[in-house]
Image: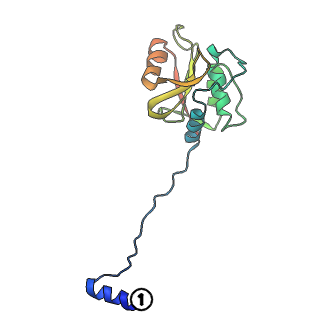
């Protein structure tokens, strides 16, 4: 009876009763290490990555960043000075210099590379052009700067050399 109804439907409407629809599902994009680092940076948002204050909150941007970075690169050394961070990133083959403020990239404005008016700083590029970094007043990991604010403060006002690194 079932087959009879199917053939009757096809004869009346000139199409099959049951249609097969093929849907193409796009491949799932695998997260890059930079994507993962960005996710980890947001996990720390509003928290102090270094609650024991091994380094004063006022100057703990590198200490905070390297503490967070160790969640994805466990053997990365804990550092506390932007020139040391720059040197380590340059030597470490898991990082490459970039010209782009892509999410998950690490930004370093190197202390003692500018006019002496502003101390260096480091952070991780987040969503919508924000940069997550240690807040020197509170020690909390926040998105106080966006890209244009960072460039204005550290590059233009401070004359600091800017480096961007991508985690491979």
Percent x, y of residue 107: 54, 27
Percent x, y of residue 146: 46, 25
If the image is split into quadrants, where does the N terminus sit?
Answer: bottom left
Q: Is residue 168 visible?
A: no
User: In the picture, residue 105 is in which quadrant?
Assistant: top right
Is residue 131 or residue 118 the one in the foreground? Answer: 131
If the image is split into quadrants, where does the C terminus sit?
Answer: top right
User: In the picture, residue 32 is in which quadrant?
Assistant: top right
- Left-right relation of 160 to 7: right
Q: Is residue 80 visible?
A: yes
- Left-right relation of 133 to 101: right
Label 1 sits on residue: 2
Classify mark 1: residues with Cα within 10 Å, few (<14), some (14-19) or many (20+): few
Residue at the location (27% across, 83% down)?
13
Percent x, y of residue 41: 58, 33
Percent x, y of residue 147: 45, 25
Secondary structure of residue under mark 1: helix
Residue at the location (42% across, 88% down)?
2
Total numbered circles: 1
- Left-right relation of 157 to 109: left
């Amino acid at each position: 009876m079932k087959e009879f109804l199917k053939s009757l439907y096809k004869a009346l409407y000139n199409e099959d009763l049951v249609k097969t629809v093929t849907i193409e599902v796009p491949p799932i994009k695998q997260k890059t290490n930079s994507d993962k680092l960005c996710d980890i940076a947001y996990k720390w948002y509003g928290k102090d990555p270094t609650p024991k204050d091994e380094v004063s909150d006022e100057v703990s941007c590198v200490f905070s960043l390297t503490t967070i970075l160790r969640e994805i690169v466990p053997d990365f050394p804990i550092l506390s000075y932007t020139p040391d961070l720059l040197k380590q990133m340059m030597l470490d083959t898991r990082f490459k210099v970039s010209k782009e403020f892509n999410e998950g990239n690490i930004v370093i404005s190197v202390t003692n590379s500018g006019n002496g008016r502003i101390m260096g700083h480091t952070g991780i590029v987040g969503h919508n052009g924000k940069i997550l970094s240690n807040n020197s007043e509170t020690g909390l990991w926040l998105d106080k700067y966006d890209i244009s604010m960072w460039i204005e403060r550290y590059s233009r006002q401070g004359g600091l050399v800017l480096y961007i690194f991508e985690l491979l």
